[in-house]
Amino acid sequence: MKKNKIKNTGLEVTEISFGTSSLGSMPDTYGYEVSEDRAQKTLKRFFQGPVNMLDTSRNYASGESEKRIGRAIKDNGKWPDKFVLSTKLDRDMNTLKFDKNQARKSLEESLEALGVDSVDILFLHDPEYAKDISEITKKNGAMDELFKIKEEGLAKAVGVAMGKINIMFPLLKNWDFDALISHNRFTLLNREADKLFDYAYNKKIAIFNAAPYAGGVLAKGPSNFKKITYQDVTEEMLRPVKEIEKICKKHNVDIGAAALQFSLRDKRISSTICGVTSIDSIEKNLAWAKAKISNEFWAEVLKLPFSSDDPEANRIYTPG
């Protein structure tokens, strides 16, 4: 699988990465549970490649995602060579505090859960949900602590991972990040991150485009899944998905393949992060990535209208 470099860090990531929020089991967000056995089988399959990057977070499923990955690493004997492990610094989920002490505590908890001495990529996660963002951005705040962690050799690359574009853009201008993660904001349905991606690409910041399936609807289809970006929606709100599906059927293209390749074909994007919770979901993503899609399909589907608004503006966030 094609690999892309992350600045001058020595890291190379495959054009697809796998995300593990749902792997820890977050039924409130995704609508289904994932057992420990299923998670371990999924991780064992991941270690076989060809995808080489796994992304997790301290707060995914209240730490369960990292614990499951840690058990898989132990069972495997070690983290595989030339694979990339990514996790995130997170706020205190009870107090929402996110100062430098919390950032350090989050890292230490991650390293313990994962059973590793360092990680390849470390992102500061979801600053928009912190109680006081100035704790993050001020001198000697959580963001400065992130870069200190890199200087100490506990992470090879650092970045910011979040949703709100209006908060993310100033952060990109004020710190020299190696990478970023944006989710749900560059899909067949939504292009809110487009200008941000232009800026990051020109600054040689590696772009990880997460959630290309808009929370699942662009993988399962509007008849099987009635949520967009983790929110219940009406039939009227599903109409843009149905228009995409109509063109997919006309050209005999899986809607999931169209959604994934929309991201893969963008030269600005270093890697597209797809959530996986089963061996089947890994194989499906790999098949969708290789599916043949005609230029005629793209010419037609890219004429459809899309949103540039915040897709989570009305979302009531729950971490479970």
Image (spheres, rainbow, N blue to C red):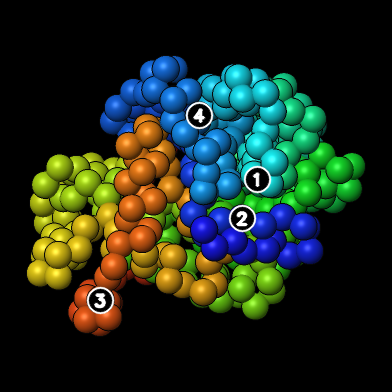
Q: How far apart are marks 2 and 1 (CA)?
A: 7 Å
Residue at horizontal 37 percent and vertical 64 percent from the top:
261
Callout 2 crowding tier (Cα within 10 Å): few <14, some 14–19, many ≥20: many
Asked if the residues shown at circle 1 and circle 4 are in contact, with their CB atoms under 8 angstroms apart, the answer is no
Q: Could you tell which of marks 2 and 4 lies nearer the N-terminus?
A: 2
Instruction: Please determine whether, in this image, residue 197 is positioned above or below residue 37.
Output: below
Please report the residue visible at 42 percent of the width from the left and 65 percent of the height from the top.
Answer: 263
- How crowded is the residue under tag 4: few (<14 C-alpha within 10 Å), some, or many (20+)? some
Vertical side of 284 occupied by 177: above or below: below
Of the image marks 3 and 1, the number of the one nearer the N terminus:
1
- Quadrant of the snapshot with the C terminus: top left
**Any part of residue 107 in sight:** yes
Q: How far, Cα to Cα, is label 2 from label 4?
A: 19 Å
Kindly identify which residue carries mark 4: 44
**Marked residue nearer the N-terminal end (1 or 4):** 4
Mark linked to residue 294: 3
Quick check: marks 2 and 1 in contact, CB under 8 Å? yes
Which amino acid, mark 2?
Val
74 versus 119 height, above or below: above
Front of the two marks 1 and 4: 4
Disc on the earlier residue, 3 or 2: 2
The amino acid beneath tag 4 is Lys
Q: Residue 84 carries which label?
A: 1
Give the amino acid at mark 3.
Ser
The local secondary structure at tag 3 comes to loop
Residue 262 quadrant:
bottom left
Q: How far apart are marks 3 and 2 (CA)?
A: 27 Å
